[in-house]
Amino acid sequence: MNEDTFNMEVRKFLKKVGVTSQREIEKAVREAVDQGRLNGDETLKAQVRLTVDGVDLDVEIDGAIELA
């Protein structure tokens, strides 16, 4: 295994996950505020499940997103 290649590929994947996740969260929250389902001052629970085929990886990451 080439450590440099592996490191770069993991970083590219995580960047894609981060950018896509942020875009989707922002879109969903704005729509919910616009539709009156959120006031805009909530704290939202968030969870991500990460799995990787070929290795025994299945982890859940919990967090919160404060809107105000």
Image (cartoon, rainbow, N blue to C red):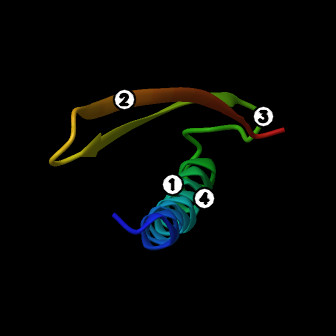
Relative to 10, does residue 43 appear above or below in the rendering?
Answer: above
Tell me where residue 9 appears, x and y as whole percent. 43, 70
Residue in the image at 51% along x and 64% along y: 7
**Residue 16 location (% of width, % of height):** 48, 69
* Quarter assignment of residue 36: top right
Which residue is nearer to you in this view: 55 or 67? Answer: 55
Tag 2–tag 1 contact (CB < 8 Å): no
User: Which residue is depicted at the point 28% across and 34% down?
Assistant: 57
Q: Which residue is mark 3?
A: 41
How far is mark 2 from mark 4, CA to CA? 24 Å
* Residue type indicated by callout 2: Val
Q: Residue at label 1?
A: 28
Residue 7 versus residue 56 in the image, above or below:
below
Real-space Cα distance between discs 2 and 3?
Answer: 29 Å
Q: Amino acid at mark 1?
A: Ala
Q: Secondary structure at mark 4?
A: helix
| Gap in angstroms between the C-alphas marked 4 and 3 | 14 Å
Q: Position of residue 30 (x, y in %)?
A: 61, 57
User: CA separation, marks 1 and 4?
Assistant: 6 Å
Proximity of marks 4 and 3: CB atoms separated by less than 8 Å: no
Q: Are marks 1 and 4 in contact (CB under 8 Å)?
A: yes
- Mark 4 is surrounded, within 10 Å at the Cα level, by few (under 14), some (14 to 19) or many (20 or more) other residues, namely few
Q: Nearer the viewer, residue 38 or 12?
A: 12
Q: Earlier in the sequence, mark 4 or mark 3?
A: 4
**Point 76% across, 40% down: residue:** 67
